[in-house]
Image (cartoon, rainbow, N blue to C red):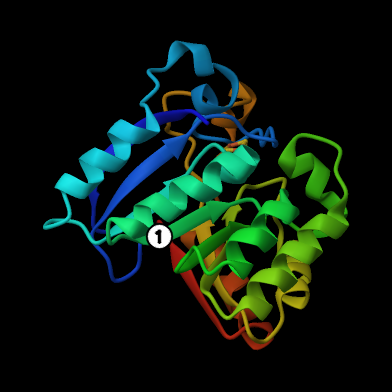
Amino acid sequence: MRICGIQGVSAIDFPGRIASVLFLGGCNFRCPFCQNPDLVLNLDSLETHMPDDVVRAIEHRAGFVDGVVVTGGEALIHGQELIPFIRRLRDVGMMVKLDTNGYEIEVLHEVLAQGLIDFVAMDVKTSLSRYEQAAGRSLNVRRIREAVTAILESGVAHEFRTTCVPGLVQEEDVCAIGSLLGSGARYVLQQFRNTSAALLDPRYAGITPYPSGVLQSFRDAIRPLVASVTVRGL
Ligand code: SF4
């Protein structure tokens, strides 16, 4: 398991918590609009923090932070190494939020079943019919369906979120996502940013984000299908 980045304090990444954020290197997807391409493709160019040191540092921050966000890359690819690591974070008093694309479904089932996470945020890239285009690889969309169901049935606090990339996410995709998630889901539409220093596929830097009115119309379209929907990043 490679911990390639640490943000000591964040007030926005874990709802209701002041949290540290851990960026785990490596990913099983190749989303062309990814804003962390080094975490996906260039791990050897990044510093690696030892899990023991990270747990100690977080324990020392316990007066300032009460949560840890485990994000990536894709954290669940670290499988059986990740599980004891999360347990250690809990042992030093931290609530844990997991950010995931959901594809490592076996590990997701395990962390949910063992009660290891307090909040899970799953990226739903687009409608299942064009998921491969958004994820940048061939895949089995049944695993995406299964991840959504596992999260909803777990009772763990959650959000599903979609970055609204023109060309990958249109209103018909948002409606299909709404049908996939269903009436128990909390959903977030995120604005696409093309201003990052580098996107995984540099051609995506040339894509103009949707105007705010388009995201608001997406919100209105999905609202009847899910429990709640918000727009982020306008
Ligand atoms: S945006 Fe896609 S490629 Fe980038 S870290 Fe997330 S799942 Fe992986």
- Circle 1 crowding by C-alpha within 10 Å: few under 14, some 14–19, many from 20: many
As drawn, which residue projects farthest toward the top? 45
Residue at 79%, 40% (x, y): give it. Answer: 133
Does residue 134 sit above or below 12 in this rendering? above
| Residue at (21, 48) in percent of width and height | 59
Q: Choose top left, top right, bottom left or bottom right for residue 137.
A: top right
- Residue 174 visible in the current orientation: no
Q: Nearer the viewer, residue 1 or 9?
A: 1
Q: Is residue 117 visible?
A: yes
Ligand 1 lies in quarter: top right
Residue labelled with disc 1? 96
Q: How far from the left and from the top, in percent, is residue 96? A: 40, 60
Rendering quarter of residue 136: top right
Residue 126 lies in quadrant = bottom right
Q: Is residue 93 above or below residue 26?
A: below
The amino acid on which the numbered mark 1 sits, given as a three-letter code, is Val
In the image, residue 43 above or below residue 180: above
Residue 57, position in %: x, y? 22, 39
Q: Residue at x 34, y 46 (%)?
A: 21
Residue 206, position as x, y percentages in the image: 57, 29
Q: Viewer-proximal residue, 110 or 119?
A: 110
Q: Position of residue 50 (x, y in %)?
A: 37, 27
- Residue pictured at 66% horizontal, 33% vertical: 32
Q: Quadrant of the C terminus?
A: bottom left
